[in-house]
Amino acid sequence: MAGWQASRIDDPVSRLRFLRRSVGDRRIWDPRTEPGRAFLRKARGPLALALGFLILIPAGTMTSAGRIWRRGPVVTAQASEKGPETIDQVWQVEQNREFETYSNGLRIERRFETGNEPRRYFVYPRGAEDSGARQERGAPAGIVFHTTESQLADFREDQTGRIRLLGEALLEFVRRERAYHYLIDRFGRVWRVVKESDAANHAGHSVWADARWTYVNLNRSFIGVSVETVTQAGSDRPEATAAQIHSLRVLTAMLRARHGIAARNCVTHAQVSVNPANMRAGYHYDWAANFPYPAVGLPDNYGLASPGLWLFGFNYDQALVNVTGQPFWKGLLLGEEQLRQDATAQGMSVTAYRQALAERYRRILSSLKQEEETSKEKASDQAKEKQG
Ligand SMILES: [Zn+2]
């Protein structure tokens, strides 16, 4: 009901205030009953471990890996809107088969490191996504933050063995599924799983945009970083320990320095996730609230208008707004507001404009699917030739 009434309030700030009042601080969400989440149960030895929900969209094959390693302050390509954005210098200090260390104190564990298909993807000019002027890239454009939603033991000294066992089983699962590039365990240790030069199956159907470019399906374009934690039942809040937050900060700084990643391209899974089947945003909602943006050294990106809404006409479910935190639906409301303004500027009704955007999205999605099929066929033909 809140949404129905709010839709009649034109000013976005008043609407946001209204929604905050009417939804209040209700926290009724049990992630285990959410239809958007698939839970995977794996028996391991005497323990039955419930391991994280992971969207696993099969990735196609691409040709070569691109890698950029920039030293020194980096001015990002998306710096135009608010003046140049500088990124702190972070460099590698030490590297061996077990671990890497960096100048900002970051240490990366490598014992579970593995490869996947090389990272190649297309970016689309923002607002003219189907103009044919897309570009192919190989370097990561952003970071998507996740939670594992896996089984957790109590965080107490006498549970150390169990915490470690669960963490290792999770790492094995993530490696097998190529599910994330990085995993930050309960003790704040940073594990590289999928190499940065490769794609990982972390974001599924997803959409994001910066000042110039639109990204569709971020498995290939964004780096997936997951925190071993769960959203508490009855709460919209995943908890991260101080050690995990510190690791998020130093890892994010290193990745931004290495790849020249703009701050506004560092966002949570909830902010990018979409469901093409019903054209709704927020299919997965890990970190829908409570991602510690300032503590991670990033601006509060919850304040960015959701690109799924204003670029491709996605809608959102009122139930989602009711159960997720305010920061998340601020982005949805701003996205909706942007959509209205753009429709007016185009002299179209919101409904007609939304439909046109959704058609544009479907065209891009079907061309992506076709290319994936073609590259899979090519790969299997090549494999057959080798055998023959
Ligand atoms: Zn996720």
Image (cartoon, grey):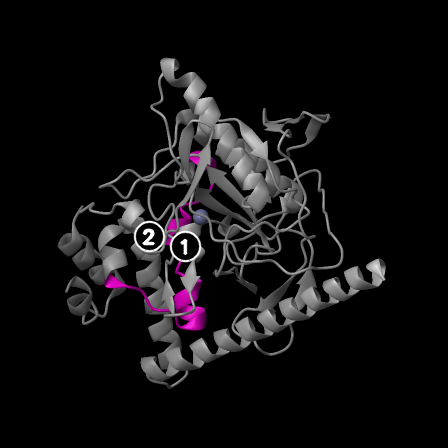
Q: How crowded is mark 1: few (under 14 residues within 10 Å), some or many (20 or more)?
A: many
Residue 181 falls left or right of residue 380: left
At horizontal 56% and vertical 46% (from top left) the residue drawn is 177
3D distance between C-alphas at marks 1 and 2: 7 Å
> x%, y% of residue 271?
41, 54
Residue 15 falls left or right of residue 213: left
Q: Which corner quadrant holds the C terminus?
A: bottom right
Give the quadrant of residue 120.
bottom right
The image shows residue 248, relative to residue 67, as above or below, that is above
Residue 187, visible in the rendered structure: no
The residue wearing badge 2 is 328
At horizontal 53% and vertical 77% (from top left) the residue drawn is 363
Q: Are marks 1 and 2 in contact (CB under 8 Å)?
A: yes
Q: How crowded is mark 2: few (under 14 residues within 10 Å), some or many (20 or more)?
A: many
Can residue 316 be found in the magenta stretch? yes
> x%, y% of residue 187?
46, 23
Query: Between disc 1 and disc 2, whose residue precedes?
Result: 1
Which one is nearer the viewer's eye here, 265 or 368?
A: 368
Q: Please, what secondary structure does the residue beneath circle 2 have?
A: helix
Residue 258 falls left or right of residue 297: right
Q: Give the range drawn in magenta.
A: 295-318
The residue wearing badge 1 is 271
At horizontal 35% and vertical 57% (from top left) the residue drawn is 331
Question: Label 2 is placed on what type of residue?
Answer: Phe
> x%, y% of residue 87?
59, 41
Give the quadrant of residue 349.
bottom left
Q: Which corner quadrant holds the N terminus?
A: bottom left
Which one is nearer the viewer's eye here, 329 or 153?
A: 153
